[in-house]
Image: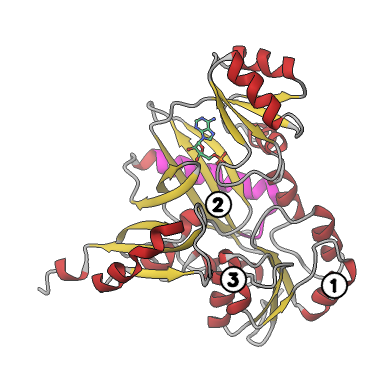
Amino acid sequence: VAGLTPGATIGILGGGQLGRMLAMAAARLGFATIIFDPDISAPAAQTASRHIAAPYTDLEALAQFAKACDVITYEFENIPLEAARHLSGLKPVHPPVAALESSQDRLVEKRFINSLGIATAPFFEINGAQDLQAALASAGGRGIVKTRRMGYDGKGQALVESPAAAAQAWDELGAHPLILEGFVDFALEISVIASRGADGSFRAYEPAMNRHGSGILRMSIVPAPLPGEVMADAVAMAQRIVTALGYVGVIGIEFFVTRDNALMVNEIAPRVHNSGHWTEAACAISQFEQHIRAVSGLPLGQTTRHSDCVMENLIGDDVEKVPGILLEGDAVLHLYGKAEARPGRKMGHVTRLFPRAGEVDPQ
Ligand code: AMP
């Protein structure tokens, strides 16, 4: 099947900063975009061609959206499955609904990863206060309770290191289906931003090392300080995952790297990913363009990078650093157009390339 041609329309479910950056990449390739997001002030509405502000449960609005689109994608994984299924009966939806299904529930996700022979943190299904105490003991007395669904940026999680803390976590989170993950004393965290085309072609960016604070990504550093074999293993695991899902699009896969360089998948996100924002500055083809290429049936771009780099998220009050960042002259700044800088809110990011402009030897 030939890919979409300029003038075609790409529908994007979700209107956050990821949708915003996808819309910008789509525009560069000559496509129009329609954002579907109930929030009238969705950041992506500022860069898209059109915005439909309706609930994800509004089948009528979804049908109108589908009618106006040539292909539909999404920028966050917590859209209701029924909405995605409804749309996929009307127009092509990429990535596949199966990827949404396994990434929406941490238990289903971990079972799926393990079924491919890929390790995860040890995990336990929790259906009662007793389950939690037993699981904590099996996990060696230290673990993280997580809601199975709707968790992001460390929300819906509690570190538990004693039976009393487990009882308290149950009181706070027990109304939701839960899992307990054994605590992984990892050396570092990495992520692979991979892509698969409609023709089955596969390309991955080099793994980035990620630093989190309070469960939120703070920084991605490329290259990651890891042996080449470990990086190649992570990419090979990413390829197994996207192949098993019959995936089309960009995916973000987060890994823990243990002290003896073993890899465990922490989480998969069936979309462009915050830890791939560096590709916008350090690669000719960013993760956003790559995703648009994949879902449009166009050839995937190269994933090689031309620079080392560090991407830093601007969270909440970090936006006050913007005037200084602009003065640096060669820092690649990207702001998301959000009016209010609430604590923990991702306001933008900045990528610094190395060597920096002033350090380049003109010879
Ligand atoms: P998540 O929302 O599952 O990606 O968790 C957010 C962050 O919490 C991760 O990036 C890790 O830094 C930390 N974390 C999550 N699960 C574990 C675990 N099982 N062991 C140790 N740290 C974890």
Which residue type carries mark 3?
A: Pro
What residue is pinned by disc 2?
A: 252
Badge nearest the viewer, 3 or 2 = 3
Closer to us: mark 2 or mark 1? 1
Left or right of residue 144: residue 188:
left
Name which residue lies at 35% across and 42% down. 228
Choose the circle earlier in sequence order: 3 or 1: 3
User: What label does residue 41 carry, if any?
Assistant: none
Image x and y of residue 332, in percent: 35, 69
Q: CA distance from mark 3 to mark 2?
A: 21 Å
Q: Is residue 310 visible?
A: yes
Q: Which residues are magenta?
A: 230-249
Q: Amino acid at mark 2?
A: Gly
SS state under label 3: helix
Where does label 1 land, which residue? 61
Instruction: Please tell me whether residue 195 is drawn above or below residue 146 in the rendered image.
Output: below
Look at the image and tell me in which quarter the N terminus lies.
bottom right
**Viewer-nearest residue: 147 or 9:** 147
What secondary structure is marked by label 2?
A: strand
Q: Secondary structure at mark 1?
A: helix
Residue 229 in the image: state x and y as whole percent.
39, 39
